[in-house]
Amino acid sequence: MNTAALTGIGNPLLLRATIFGAWRDNPARTMLATVAIALGIALGVAVHLINASALNEFRLAASHLAGEADLVVRGPRAGFDEKIYPRIARLPQVEAADPALEIEVPVVGRRDALKIVGLDPLRAIQVQPGLLPEERGLMGELFQADAVLLSPSAAEWLGLRAGDALKIQIGTSAVALRVIGLLPEGAYPQRIALMDIASAQWKLDRLGRLNRMDLVLRPGTDLERFREYLQGELPSGVLVATPDAEIERGASLSRAYRTNLDMLALIALFTGAFLVFSSQVLALLRRRTQFALLRALGMTRSGLGLSLVGEGAAIGAIGSACGLVLGCIVAAYAVTHFGADLGAGYFRTVMGNFHLEPRTLAGYFALGVLFAVLGAAAPAIEAARRPPAKALRAGDEEEGWKRVRIAAIGVTLIAFGLVLTFAPPINGLPIAGYWAIALILLGVVLIMPNIADAVLRVLPYPGFVPGELAMAQLQATPRQVAMCLTVIVISFSLMVSMLIMVHSFRASLETWLERMLPADLFLRSAPFGETAFVTVEEQQRIAGTPGIARVEFLRSQNLLLLPERPPVILIARPLPAEAAVKKLPLVSPVIIPHTGEPPAVWVSEVAADLYGWHVGDRIRLPIDNTQRQFTVAGIWRDYARQTGAIIIDRDLYIHLTGDRLANDAAFWLASNVSLPQVAAAVREQLSGAPGVEIATTREVRATSLSVFDRTFAVTYALEVAAILIGLFGVSVSFGAQALARRREFGVLRHLGMTRREIGMMLGYEGVIVSLLGVGFGIVCGWVVSLILIHVINRQSFHWSMDLHVPWLALAELGIVLIPAAAITAVWSGRAAMKKDVIGAVREDW
């Protein structure tokens, strides 16, 4: 035999002895490791492609709406005076300007809104030529007062065609518009309706108001300098930005959510890497004699190490390829049948089209291979370093790992990870927090042999022979035990951390709802949209309804504070300064401004974080297009408005703006009054308004919690994936150990132990190991959950939550995992004992 040829990586004998030999000797172990990688890749690819498809459609739609505009002037929901338009259009730098209204309007009969854009068709030809119909007849008909053009996707969603009536809600009344035709295919990919600007102002109750202007500048104009000049000429709260900045501002709303989903999806892949690591280590224990023989025949250390790393790479490549196919299938099916929104509502109205991203797929494939290679690297290095003479004899399983001194490195990684939790976000994302979790988990893996050794030494021996042998085996091989613990601890800790985080969020949300919903009945003028409201006369009629003891009306508007940030919601509700402590879920002290000082407002945690506001600060807000100064009297917790919210006393708001309309109302009923009867009476006062919703406190809470559960549906799916991978890891670990201990089982059988007694021994080992894994996993998961709650979520979404541990759910998980580990250990041992015990003993000679 040419022993020198054994050093070649591509040698067929080498391939058979390593990669192909592993698959032949234990296909189940290799298959489970491959499935773990595939599942992690599939989840990551599916989540990313769904989000990417939605974001691509969102950007495409915004780009079509901007057309050829160089700058976009954007106002708040209430808009700005249309007299600004001719003044800007006459500027020498402006070649064309298109005045517009862009409003989300509730659709009667649907719990959703339709974007209606009112524009000047004659001006739009210069700014958005691709948005208008090519038929001259439709262009002329668009000037009629009730005429509307629908995009093809809007027509399909509404089930309407030319000549049909589109009923929308203005105030509490239904207004009918006439569909005169459809926009050209490809003009606008999402749901939209176009109207003439004058008709839109009239029908949508926005007479004399605009909230958007698209500007085309003359060639040679310095874009940035003109933008700065124009910003100085606009009223307070009206901002000017480039179309790209407008698009990115809208996309930034979902950036943190999308990033967190991507990171959570990679958790499954992260766990799969540890599964590869554990399975490779335990497989090497069984195959050490093969490797020692190859080394004795002339194979070099580097040749053996690289071949074993190649085995991990092969697992990663196959798993990644399968994961890519599965992820693409899941993403395509989800986008086609359920839309591109993953539950949070960011892309609720986006009609997604599935888009493949070759670079993304290549990146995920490389990531899967990399994780698998990293999982196989340490076992490969140890196998290559082991002297052939020692590996050829029995009893070498534990000695090889005694030389590995990694506890100090593990402690260092954990310490560094804890330090990273104090780092600020990077570009608004908790990058340091993600690294902290990864380093802590890796550090736990590295110190696991020392922890296992210390704990096993103090455990008492049971009072029966199989248990005594099991404890002796565990205490004699703490590093092999640590390999089994690795997958259990990592997978279980990730399950625990996500459970604690989601449960804490849900419990905090329930507490928040109790504080924010103190009334008996609640009225909402429309579930979505910007044109629904309750008039002053309707408010008076509602307040006089029999059975209502007290009523509070609420008005909400939006404020544009910075061009790069989404609008903040301004909430006007009855809230005297001295009543804030009782009415708001405050997370800060409260100050009451003295006479002569700026009046009080209360800002949400999100707004405080985004704009750097603190209690006592004096801030300027563009109320009714006029800068006004206020005092931050307190900071409150808000889970409903992710762009930030500011509460102002309604009487003060009316005094400043003259706006007496209301969007919502809360009713406190008199004693011994029927809730359904009062709700029916209120609806009668509104003449059966089509879109108005009236619900009890219990119904509002149930709806809010169902929205929460839908938002976290993907997280629940990731938890299930982590559970499956964890159970795979238990099976792989015990299966590989059982095969590596065939000689031990043979000796025990020769000494008189029955198969049942050996099964009891293995079952006891499985219970002890899984108990340790569950215990360590709970501690590690608790630490990770603190990072998720106080670092990841805080830096991503800027809201806080209280820690709530779901002990019952954790106990149920432990109850599932511990018996599963014991059963797997017994089953693996019985499978190993089916082979010839005499032959197994001879392996030791």
Image (cartoon, rainbow, N blue to C red):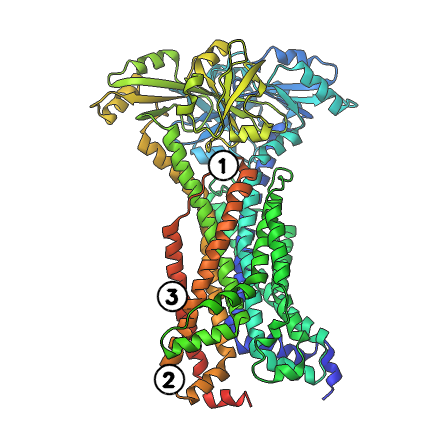
Q: Quadrant of residue 826?
A: bottom left
The vertical placement of 729 against 514, above or below, is below
**Where is residue 381 shown, x and y percent of the image?**
66, 70
Find the distance from the CA under tag 3 to the CA under tag 2.
22 Å
- 339 relative to 562 in the view: left or right: left
The vertical placement of 573 against 816, above or below, is above
Tell me what residue is drawn at x 62 percent, y 39 percent. Answer: 425
Does residue 134 appear anywhere in the picture?
no
Tell me what residue is drawn at x 54 percent, y 18 percent. Answer: 631
User: First in sequence: mark 1 or mark 3?
Assistant: 1
> Of helix, strand and loop, which one carries label 1?
loop
User: Callout 2, which amino acid?
Assistant: Thr
In the rendered image, the quadrant that contains the N terminus is bottom right
Q: How many neighbours does mark 1 have within 10 angstroms: few (below 14), some (14-19), or many (20 or more)? A: many
Find the distance from the CA under tag 1 to the CA under tag 2.
58 Å
| Front-most of residues 44 and 72 | 44
User: Which residue is under mark 3?
Assistant: 819
Give me the disc on residue 754: 2
The vertical placement of 725 against 537, above or below, is below
- 584 relative to 481 in the view: left or right: left
User: Callout 1, which amino acid?
Assistant: Ser
User: Which residue is under mark 1?
Assistant: 800
User: Callout 3, which amino acid?
Assistant: Pro
**Where is residue 614 shown, x and y percent of the image?**
56, 26
Q: How many neighbours does mark 3 have within 10 angstroms: few (below 14), some (14-19), or many (20 or more)? A: some
Find the distance from the CA under tag 1 to the CA under tag 3.
37 Å
